[in-house]
Image (spheres, rainbow, N blue to C red):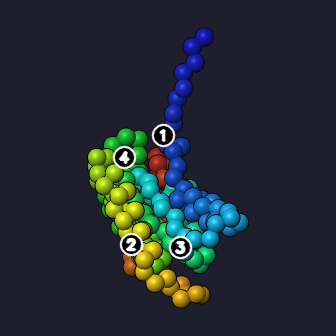
Amino acid sequence: MKLTAHFNESMRRTSISSALDYSRGLFNGNGYKGLRRVIDVSGDGPNNAGRPVTFARDDTLAAGIVINGLPLMTREGMGSRWSLEDLDRYYYYCVIGGPGSFVIPVLEWNNFPEAVRKKLVLEIAWQHRQPPHAGSMVAPVQAEGYDCLIGEKIMQSIIDERL
């Protein structure tokens, strides 16, 4: 008997919000006290599962954690159906936040090592700056018309076309 596995690509999900919620909890009681708490998010598409990403981002920022982003905009593989031409803008408006936060888009896989090096340099350079005053909070970037639910809407349209 031969078994064949079938991957239903319409079931593929990305939950940046769940990743932020889970990661945020890892800082508490881990035995380390750093000068700065940072979550780096990389992915090839927008949030399309879990709660809205802006809610998780705002809760993470309120906990004093910075969020940086490395959107993978390589345009190949299974993720191409969910790709956003402006995934870097999505990360900027909907995912990242906090003092010194940044987005470094990866447009080709051979640029990934360079992007990681740049990310490390930016994070190390930030450590030598004066930390924000205790209790201060940097507000997230306001989307000004950017639809931070675009991933959920793309997923719903895929589900609808299959019905």
Q: Which residue is mark 2?
A: 125
Per the model, the C-alpha gap separating discs 2 and 4 is 34 Å
**For the residues carrying marks 2 and 4, which lies nearer the camera in this image?**
2
Rendered location of residue 70, percent (x, y): 40, 59
Please, what is the three-letter code of the amino acid marked with disc 3?
Answer: Arg
The quarter of the displayed image where residue 116 is located: bottom left
The quadrant of the rendering that contains the N terminus is top right
Per the model, the C-alpha gap separating discs 2 and 1 is 41 Å
* Camera-side residue of 43 and 7: 43
Q: Which residue is mark 1?
A: 9
**For the residues carrying marks 3 and 4, which lies nearer the camera in this image?**
3
Say which label, 3 or 4, has the lower sequence index.
3
**For the residues carrying marks 3 and 1, which lies nearer the camera in this image?**
3
Looking at this view, name the residue that lies furthest to the right: 29
Against 163, residue 60 (above or below) is: below
Per the model, the C-alpha gap separating discs 3 and 4 is 35 Å
Rendered location of residue 145, percent (x, y): 39, 76
Please, what is the three-letter code of the amino acid marked with disc 1?
Answer: Glu
Say which label, 1 or 4, has the lower sequence index.
1
Q: Residues within 10 Å of mark 1 (few under 14, many from 20)?
A: few
Q: Which residue is mark 4?
A: 80
Looking at this view, name the residue that lies furthest to the top: 1
Q: Residues within 10 Å of mark 4 (few under 14, many from 20)?
A: few
Residue 115 in view: yes
Q: Residues within 10 Å of mark 2 (few under 14, many from 20)?
A: few
Q: Which residue is mark 3?
A: 36
